[in-house]
Amino acid sequence: MDASASPAAPGPAPVPADRGRAAPAPPAGHGPVFPPAPAPVSRLRRLATPVGVMAAVVGAFGYVATVDPNEPGHYPVCPVLRFTGILCPGCGGLRSAHAFAHGDLVAALGSNALAVAGYVVFAAVWLLWMVRASRGQPLRIALAPVHLWGLGVVLLAFSVLRNLPFGSGLAP
């Protein structure tokens, strides 16, 4: 066997011709390579969205406070209740909001206790949103799937319990 027939070991890699040269400078008259950082946003602008959301919520509660849902004809009937006779988790929510807006916490809890819990959660999240927005930090609430499933279980259990004879205290 001839030694020259065996495959040759790879040699050194070829050296590029421009090795050791500096990178070319950008053409004159063009801006910097990276754009400038955005201007800081004012505190008033950062707070505009959470304040706007609260204004909408206050407006909605104000409307429900003036137009009594206990009187028939002002609001549509819950379609789940109308077609199935089953109280959904939201049934009594408007009556709860009406009572809550008038400061009657006992009547609000009696109409829909889960809605009152939702009002408290909303207030806490909104307050956190305001604090973070005033500091220039985004509001990030990352819920894991287990939290969403847990919320679904709570809604389902609330619906089932309020439709059973021994859970009539949860019915509006």
Image: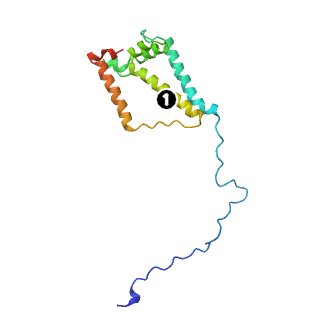
The residue under label 1 is 125
- Tell me where residue 74 appears, x and y as whole percent: 45, 12
Give the side of residue 53 with respect to residue 161, left or right.
Answer: right
Residue 22 located left or right of residue 141: right
Q: Secondary structure at mark 1?
A: helix
Q: Residue at x 52, y 35 (%)?
A: 139
Type of amino acid under label 1: Val
Q: How many marks?
A: 1
Say which quarter of the image contains residue 169.
top left
Residue 156 occupies quadrant: top left
**Is residue 11 among what the camera can see?**
yes
- For the residue pair 144 and 77, the one nearer the viewer reads as 144
Residue 48 appears at what percent x and percent y?
Answer: 60, 29
At 41% from the left edge and 18% from the top edge, which residue is drawn? 93
From the viewer's perspective, is residue 97 above or below residue 123? above
Name the quadrant of the C terminus: top left
Q: Position of residue 125 (x, y in %)?
A: 49, 29
**Residue at x 63%, y 33% (from the top left corner):** 43
- Taking the view exactly as shown, the residue that stands out farthest to the top is 71
* Residue at figure coordinates x 42%, y 36% from the top left: 143
Please, which residue is most extreme toward the right here? 29
Q: Residues within 10 Å of mark 1 (few under 14, many from 20)?
A: some
Query: Quadrant of the image for the N terminus?
Result: bottom left
Query: Is residue 84 in sight in this rendering?
Result: no
Up the image or down, 139 lies above or below 172; here it is: below
Q: Is residue 82 left or right of 99 when viewed as pictured? A: left
Classify residue 110 as left or right of residue 135.
Answer: left
Q: Position of residue 12 (x, y in %)?
A: 51, 78
